[in-house]
Image: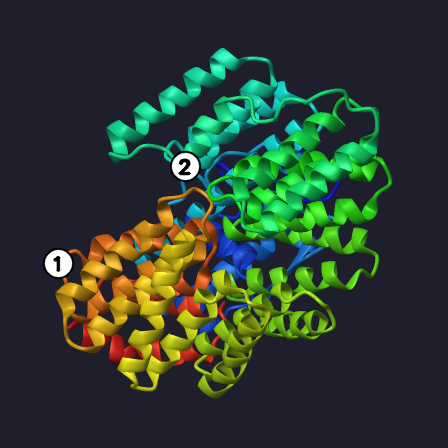
């Protein structure tokens, strides 16, 4: 056994399974954690400014601290250079890396699983580093929750409901105001044969939400507490009857009859359970899961449970194609919930099972590209999204291409590449129009309206945003409503009506929160616009809204919008915020951030 670095809980080193001498001083541990958690190696100047702002010779102090790390890590690591690189010997265990990139089973087995990142570490003389560390702790907490969520769903899909209850209970303890966590626990309790416990948990959630949040949970909680599968009507003697129900459900969904379609698919699952045919049950479960995820608002938790069970059965039955679809749909749910590391693992599994199937691989590229974009990895995001567009162009279905073009347009827009963004988003809108995908229009149209606003055509932007918002309301899509209303808030700000702008921008993220299965990036994007306007006009509540933006983006790993939150802090004069923003921005390969990070500008705004 080689070196093990444990930073979940109180930090410690082990070598050969025995305790090893740790680096001396909190800042040496802080430096080690920073190097472990940053994707791109930082420059010495940036590191020195972040960790040692009070030192007479920051670079000299950094040199001493690096030598202390070398002494402690010994031959198991190389650390140094400019930018500073940490290279660990193959086989070195870093518990936080296992948490992020390992399987859920490996993660929950870690000795420090569930603990805070470097618990107890305080570096008070370095406010920028303290700010960075608090955000990393939030992300680790978010990753821990994502692991618990997947563990509970995986065990539920395998029929190990009692073990699933344990992980779901831990998830609720860590996230008491997350409706999805409560819904999952209720489903696990029912599956474990405890309907009374499930009912009590659902009622406890309702009481908590009413008392603390002043709202009622969505209908997903009630559905979870009740029997969800339709009763079997008559005697099912063959798989043909089950397939007919699946096809009837798909036809109903295509015609817009969502409730009828879902009920038919639930009937198919119930009927398939009476036949000793795992392959047929797997197909029914994956079809039901996909319908719940894409067609039934607020039902992603039920859909995810169905998908996990179906994908597991399909793999056991040797139906790699059905399993690939199941894991692809699971990855989409994880992406929407900003469980990006879990989504990456599910997409890898999808690609292996897909065996060259172009539609699955197109979705893999698109979803993975969107994950990388959300987390600030622009280099990978651009390549993956362009690949997704090319794969999708070869498909008869319009949905993958429309989504790929929209996400690529968003990529160009946020990089400030306006001409490229216009070209791609206009293609997306043309594709949507040609395919009659009315319910999807609001997504590319909102980004196209943002371009109009950037180019100074406020009237055109307003028209697009109004249409996007109205259409979102018509189809009942909280995400489309939210991003459309965000645009209208920015239009009001551009016209100088700041009170109306703040009212609209305050409501936009709330729209996203009214259902438990919306795209969390859109909520953060709306919060970002609220903070930008609030800071520009020195609104009284600006700091409270920045706190909210920072909490959401740090926990979910939405790094670029976390950079924005830290820049807003700097503009309000918070000590250490400018240096923290620079360190965070160095991990996001977006040239559009450069103009926001000019020290003179931040200093002027803060004065």
Q: Is residue 277 above or below residue 20?
A: above
Q: Is residue 571 above or below residue 328?
A: below
- At horizontal 80% and vertical 49% (from top left) the residue drawn is 321
Q: CA distance from mark 1 to mark 2?
A: 28 Å
Mark 1 vs mark 2: which is more N-terminal?
2
Q: Is residue 476 above or below residue 16?
A: below
**Quarter holding the N terminus?**
top right
Residue 202: assigned label: none
Circle 2 is placed at which residue position? 178
Mark 2, secondary structure of its residue: loop
Tally the marks. Answer: 2
Q: Taking 603 as reference, is 557 left or right?
A: right
Viewer-side residue, 508 vs 411: 508
Examine the image and state in which quarter residue 465 appears: bottom left
Circle 1 packing at 10 Å, graded few (<14), some (14-19), many (20+), is few
Q: Position of residue 605 (x, y in %)?
A: 20, 74
Q: Taking 111 as reference, is 224 left or right?
A: left
Q: Is residue 555 above or below residue 166?
A: below
Mark 1, secondary structure of its residue: loop
Residue 540: assigned label: 1
- At horizontal 24% and vertical 56% (from top left) the residue drawn is 506
Examine the image and state in which quarter residue 190 appears: top right
Q: Position of residue 318 (x, y in %)?
A: 87, 40
**Which residue sits furthest right?**
318
**Quarter holding the C terminus?**
bottom left
Q: Taking 404 as reference, is 243 left or right?
A: right
Q: Position of residue 179 (x, y in %)?
A: 42, 35
Mark 1 or 2: in front is 2
- At horizontal 31% and vertical 26% (from top left) the residue drawn is 208
């Amino acid at each position: 056994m080689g070196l093990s670095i444990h930073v979940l809980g109180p930090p410690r080193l082990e070598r050969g399974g025995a305790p090893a001498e740790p680096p001396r001083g909190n800042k040496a541990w802080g430096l080690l954690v920073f190097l472990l958690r940053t994707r791109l190696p930082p420059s010495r100047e940036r590191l020195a400014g972040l960790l040692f702002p009070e030192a007479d010779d920051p670079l000299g102090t950094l040199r001493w601290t690096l030598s202390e790390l070398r002494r402690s890590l010994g031959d198991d690591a190389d650390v140094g250079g400019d930018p500073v690189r940490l290279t660990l010997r193959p086989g070195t265990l870093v518990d936080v890396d296992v948490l992020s990139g390992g399987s859920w089973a490996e993660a929950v087995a870690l000795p420090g699983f569930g603990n805070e990142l470097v618990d107890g570490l305080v570096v008070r003389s370095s406010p920028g580093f303290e700010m960075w560390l608090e955000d990393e702790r939030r992300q680790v907490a978010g990753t821990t929750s994502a692991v618990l969520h997947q563990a509970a769903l995986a065990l539920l899909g395998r029929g190990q409901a009692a073990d699933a209850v344990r992980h779901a209970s831990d998830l609720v303890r860590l996230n008491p105001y997350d409706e999805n966590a409560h819904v999952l626990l209720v489903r696990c309790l029912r599956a474990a044969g405890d309907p009374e416990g499930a009912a009590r948990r659902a009622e406890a959630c309702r009481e908590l939400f009413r008392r603390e949040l002043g709202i009622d949970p969505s209908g997903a909680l009630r559905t979870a507490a009740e029997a969800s599968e339709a009763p079997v009507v008559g005697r099912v003697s063959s798989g043909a009857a089950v397939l007919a129900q699946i096809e009837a459900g798909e036809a109903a969904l295509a015609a817009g009859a969502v409730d009828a379609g879902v009920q038919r698919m639930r009937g198919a699952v119930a009927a398939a359970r009476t036949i000793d045919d795992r392959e047929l049950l797997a197909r029914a479960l994956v079809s039901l899961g996909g319908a719940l995820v894409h067609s039934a608002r607020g039902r992603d938790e039920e859909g995810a449970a169905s998908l996990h069970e179906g994908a597991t059965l399909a793999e056991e039955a040797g139906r790699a194609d059905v399993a690939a679809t199941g894991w692809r749909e699971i990855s989409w749910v994880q992406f929407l919930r900003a469980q990006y590391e879990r989504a990456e693992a599910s997409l890898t599994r999808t690609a292996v099972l897909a065996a060259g199937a172009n539609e699955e691989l197109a979705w893999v590229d698109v979803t993975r590209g969107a994950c990388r974009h959300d987390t600030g990895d622009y280099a990978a995001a651009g390549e993956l999204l362009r690949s997704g567009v090319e794969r999708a162009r070869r498909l008869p279905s319009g949905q993958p291409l429309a989504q790929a073009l929209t996400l690529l347009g968003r990529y160009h827009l946020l990089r400030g590449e306006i001409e490229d963004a216009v070209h791609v988003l206009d293609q997306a809108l043309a594709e949507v129009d040609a395919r009659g995908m009315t319910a999807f229009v609001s997504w590319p149209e909102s980004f196209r309206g943002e371009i109009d606003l950037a180019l100074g055509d406020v009237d055109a932007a307003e028209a697009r945003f109004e249409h996007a918002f109205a259409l979102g309301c018509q189809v009942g899509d909280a995400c489309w409503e939210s991003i459309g209303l965000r645009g209208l808030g920015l239009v009001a700000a551009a016209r100088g009506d700041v009170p109306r702008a703040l009212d609209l921008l305050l409501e936009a993220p709330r729209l996203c929160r009214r259902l438990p299965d919306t795209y969390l990036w859109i909520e953060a994007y709306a919060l970002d616009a609220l903070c930008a306007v609030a800071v520009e006009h020195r609104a009284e509540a600006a700091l409270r809204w920045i706190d909210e933006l920072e909490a959401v983006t740090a926990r979910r790993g939405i790094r670029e919008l976390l950079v924005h939150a830290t820049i807003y802090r700097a503009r309000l004069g918070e000590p250490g915020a400018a240096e923290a923003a620079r360190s965070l921005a160095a991990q996001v390969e977006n040239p559009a951030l450069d103009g926001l990070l000019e020290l003179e500008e931040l200093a002027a705004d803060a004065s």
